[in-house]
Image: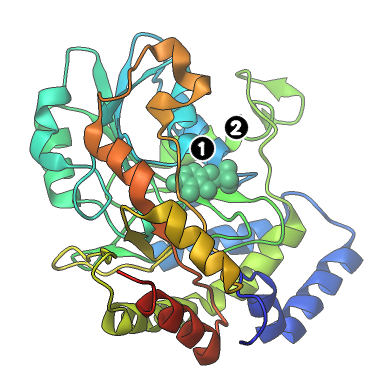
Amino acid sequence: MAGKIMPNRLDRVFYQYQEELEAKALEVLRSGWYVLGPEVEGFEREFADYTGSRYCVGLASGLDALWLAFRVLGIGPGDEVIVQANTYIASVMGITINGATPVFAEPDVYFNMDTSRLEGLITERTRAILAVHLYGQAANMGEILRVCQKHHLRLVEDCAQSHGACFKGKMTGTFGDIGCFSFYPSKNLGAFGDAGAIVTDDEELAASMRIYRNYGSEKRYHNKVVGANSRLDELQAGLLRVRLRHLAGLSEERKKLAGRYSRELQNECLLLPRVRPGCDSVWHQYVIRTKRRTELIQYLDRQGIGTIIHYPIPPHLSEAYAYLGHQRGEYPLAEEYADTVLSLPMYNGMTAGEQEAVIEALNAFPA
Ligand SMILES: *Cc1c(COP(=O)(O)O)cnc(C)c1O
């Protein structure tokens, strides 16, 4: 066997584009300008173009993108925001940092929000829906948009895992008022440190976001609101510009890896992920489900194959949200996913031999 196979390998993309990345890093280091400068402006322009949005505002993280999105939309105490129950907890923190209340929706078979029961969650306090495009696949945006329009709700999208993913040909992040992105190193478009951004077509929201990210000031030392320090730095922005140039190819590579898993995995105790008809996925994760997860993790680990659970504790059962008073059993589907999901090794630069070893091991797992 070809050494240990890790769930993710961040060094592979670096070495693939080493020359370009090192040249850009040196250029920024030598420029003498390190925070909010020409690289950030260049990245904002290029990422807005890439997504087909009018504006992009660079920020320090994906969580900042989320909480600042609700902040600039004026959503806070007394307001409710609907979000899927099986998301990463940062989605929920984006809501609760503002004092707003998350209302959890059960997931559908694609691991996204189940829209068939969406309208039943709306109350007179509902102000927005947070659509999370989990694992790289677009949520059911047709239905989510219809519900938002009918009930006059704001729509925010969590695209931390969906850079470049489309719903019926339109890119995630461009359906709602604000699209929130993370460029944490393990994301499909990853920086070499923390970074994030929002995209929007609304000039006022973009302007407001620029004020909030820099201590609430438009003009230096003239502070309009209590803001944050959520500035994107030049080094990350410059390196992100390099990676963005290659993102389409990197997404294609992930699709090929996922396609091979889906074609070649054959074991009746594994449920393979499904893609929503009319949509594609950028395969941030390749997530299988199995009732025998603990056993499978140990079996793979003995063969040097690492896996990760995204995510073992749904936010409503997390200690951080004990104050919301939810009980086990309230969101049975989300809880079942938390108990059965497993992400297989999947990364740009994964070799055919590495993937073969994972497939062989899984197919040989005694059913
Ligand atoms: C990573 C992630 C975030 C948070 O992004 P950070 O850059 O780590 O703050 C939010 N939502 C989802 C779905 C994520 O995967």
Q: How busy is the neighbourhood of tag 2: few (under 14 within 10 Å), some, or many (20 plus)?
A: many
Disc 2 under 8 Å from ligand 1? The reply is: no
In depth, the one of 111 and 18 nearer the eye is: 111
Q: Is residue 322 above or below residue 31?
A: above
Residue 197 in sight here: yes
Residue 7 in sight here: no
Q: Left or right of 266: which side holds 298? A: right
Q: Which element is circle 1 on? A: helix
In depth, the one of 185 and 285 nearer the eye is: 285
Disc 1 under 8 Å from ligand 1? The reply is: no
C-beta proximity under 8 Å, tags 2 and 1: yes
Q: Position of residue 335 (x, y in %)?
A: 31, 36
In depth, the one of 312 and 274 nearer the eye is: 312
Q: Amino acid at mark 2?
A: Ile
The residue where tag 2 is placed is 211
Q: Position of residue 333 (x, y in %)?
A: 23, 39
Residue shown at 17%/12% (left/top)? 124
The colour scheme applied to this rendered structure is: rainbow
Q: Residue furthest front?
A: 366
Q: Is residue 2 above or below residue 328?
A: below
Q: Quadrant of the N terminus?
A: bottom right
The residue where tag 1 is placed is 207
